[in-house]
Image (cartoon, rainbow, N blue to C red):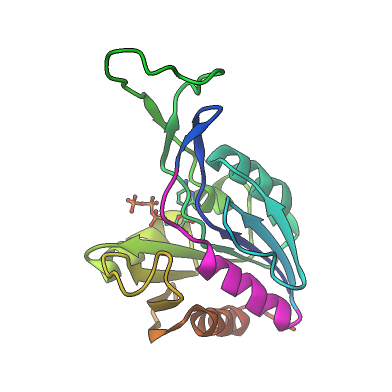
Amino acid sequence: MQILVTAGPTWEAIDPVRYLGNRSSGKMGYAIAAGAAARGHGVLLVSGPVALPAPDGAEVVRVEGAAEMFDAVAERIGGCDAAVMAAAVADFTPARPAGQKIKKGTGGLTLELVPTRDILASAREIFGFKGLLVGFAAETENLRENALGKMARKGCDLVVGNDVSRADIGFGSDDNEVSIFAADGSERAVGRRPKAEVAAAILDEVEARVPAAI
Ligand code: CTP
């Protein structure tokens, strides 16, 4: 199958030298891309700024901001059988990024932020994507309820929920612990393990639901 994966954070420009970012390392999305390529799938990895090498066998499209990631996905998702949106996309971006470096001056600084577009929610609604759609739900509380809500709102077949309030797993860590919720009502708890193994569990769930998966 052909699988699109988004990974990493986005950087939202404030001026030419500053940005708003987040703590995503990209490791989970890169592990999924690497695992899918190793299984013989065609992989298109749309990646925000991370310090990771391109996974063997994956085609990597590097982007910076949420708008650029949106466009990269919009352009490429059509030919894919599955899409796994693991990126930590910024929900807000500066309304008017400054063309020149903002000088310190003497007073404070107020940034006006505007919402970004939701790439995952756009898959069905705007891109008309018919393939298997996988979202992530990074939560600090009510994991199950929030994950199921995101699944319904964003038209996902699977949602991978993880508890980002825990310091020992998740952001930046080499391990993760997740629950994989499916729209068909099934639920699979994947206890703490290396992200490569969590990726394998996610890919098993994807392959089980994509007809004629290779
Ligand atoms: N996502 C996306 N585009 C955005 C925001 C989020 O594609 N602009 C995707 C993420 O890649 C992830 C999922 O949506 O697969 C859930 O992201 P999350 O940040 O947990 O949820 P939000 O939709 O931002 O909701 P909330 O802030 O209420 O938790």
Number of dots carrying numbers: 0
Residue that lies at the very extreme toward the left in this rendered image: 141
Q: Which residues are magenta?
A: 21-40
Lateral position of residue 62 relative to residue 102, left or right? right
Q: Nearer the viewer, residue 128 or 141?
A: 141
- x, y percentage for residue 86? 51, 62
Q: Residue at x 53, y 62 (%)?
A: 26
Q: Residue at x 28, y 68 (%)?
A: 143
Residue 212: in sight, yes or no? no
| Residue 24 lies in quadrant | bottom left
Quarter of the image for the C terminus: give it: bottom right
Q: Residue at x 65, y 55 (%)?
A: 46
Q: Say if 205 sits above or below 156 in the image.
A: below
Q: Say if 176 sits above or below 146 in the image.
A: below
Q: Nearer the viewer, residue 76 or 29?
A: 29
Q: Main secondary structure of the magenta part?
A: helix
- x, y percentage for residue 149? 33, 60
